[in-house]
Amino acid sequence: MTTTPEETTTGLSEALTDWMARSVGGKITSVRRQPGGGRREAWFVDAETAGGERLELFLRYDRSDPDETGDPFTLQDEARYFLALQDTPVPVPRIQAVHPREQAILAERVPGQAWFSRLRDEEQRLAVAREFMGVLAELHKVDPRRVALPGLSPKADLRELVHAEIDRWEALYRRSGEPADPLIELGLAWVRRNIPDVSEPAVIVQGDTGPGNFLYLDGRVTAVLDWELAHLGDVHDDLAWLTVRAVQEPFTHLPDRLADYAAAAGRTLDLDRIRYYRVLAELRILILGHRGPGGIDPLSEVGNNLIFRVLHRRLFVEALADVTGAELEPPAPLTAADLDDAWLYDAAVAQLGQIIVPRSEDPFVVLRGKGVARIVKYLRESARLGDAKRRCELDDLEGLLGCRPDTVADGFARLADGLREGAVTLSAALPVLYRWVLRETQVCRPAMGRLADRHFDPLS
């Protein structure tokens, strides 16, 4: 197939478009970038077969080279789970093709809405949430041998699989080349020491499961999406991810949904195991976001990633405090300095919010416009609060380390070393880290909106 100029201006290469055309045995008639998709790009693809049949497809695409990045979460591995779940009680899109070299999956386009918060009818919200818990229970009943995973046996002891999962994430963190993060160092040490001492069969775990990662339509679940973090492990791992995603997308009454799952799965749940895996889930999110400015694509969703990074750093500390029973005191609010050019930040936000975004018809452009507004809001607060934040953090680090570091970065590097080597205890570090993430939240509050005040729902 020869692509038209319109198709090659979308940002997809001619070679990739040709591959999609060969996969359907016809031609590609249109491609449209969609908002969302997390680390991967999402595209709506329309095609027509040689026989004239019109196909509505979805392309999941990652331009990075895992051989260069060391990222273990490839789309080829994700495709293993999609293919393993075809024709099971778990609704997943039917795969059209998996690219042999590039990270690209072409699948049928399933109708439905992803954002659960946009579902306003309370009866439908309840019906969809209940059905999803049943789907999750069905997933955990699927024979894990359906997934051909090199080097991992579905018969392995559950504790062994959790150790292997932690190893995989620590290796990703250590390979980053970025300065050590005391939150991640603390988390890695804690999850290793506290792996649940249980032995039971492993299941297919979706990872990052819950509202936002499945589609619904007319009160029914139409497809479960995003198997990037799928692995073999504990059912409580998925239930913990559900509680994490429910912070961003409230998911009706969480204890009732856990009861729905227990009834559908025919098992009793261990809430302490959910609390353990909630720490592990938040730790994974921190590791995925552990990149310095040089490792961030300036054309990626910078604004959204900024607020979610701050949100999950706070949630990580709150999850760890919950599971350990630590009682933490919030810091005093930071005092803002006067800012002569504050009106320029406000003007930029106003023009984005009242002129540029409302007049944009492309949903992808709208999403990025809102992201730019979040960046501007953050920069304004950072200019107002940055000096006060720096003084408070140096004071905290001096009290913990016994001497005042020259810079905040130096102090947190020494704290990370102390946590990794066991010289600094969790009980000593956690209050300092809690005040740190709450100050980050204050700086990011205007950009975060309601997320600044969202916390985990009670489990019981």
Image (tube, grey):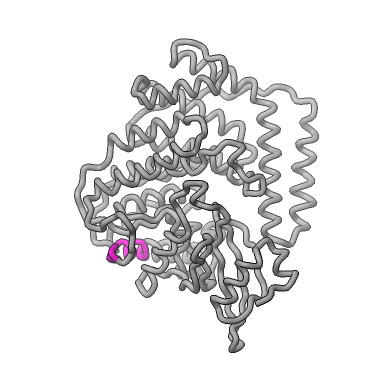
Instruction: Establish if 323 lies above or below 433.
Output: below
Horizontal and vertical percent position of residue 175 = 46, 39
Residue depicted at 60% across the width and 81% down the height: 26
**Residue 62 placement, left or right of 370:** left
Magenta span dominant secondary structure: helix
Is 371 situated left or right of 89 in this image?
right
Please, which residue is most extreme toward the bottom here?
A: 51
Residue 53 position in % (x across, y down): 58, 85
Q: Is residue 194 visible?
A: yes
Is residue 32 found inside the magenta-colored segment of the image?
Answer: no
- In the foreground, 405 or 369: 405
Q: Which residue is at a point 78% across and 41% down the rendered structure image? A: 348
- Name the image quarter holding the N terminus: bottom right
Looking at this view, is 392 or 15 the one in front? 15
Q: Position of residue 449 (x, y in %)?
A: 61, 42
Q: Which residues are magenta?
A: 134-145
Q: Position of residue 129 (x, y in %)?
A: 43, 61
Vertical placement of 132 versus 288: above or below?
A: below
**Residue 458 seen anywhere in this rendered image of the structure:** no
Note whether 180 is above or below 291 in the view shown: above
Q: Quadrant of residue 276?
A: top left
Residue found at the very far top of the displayed protein: 403
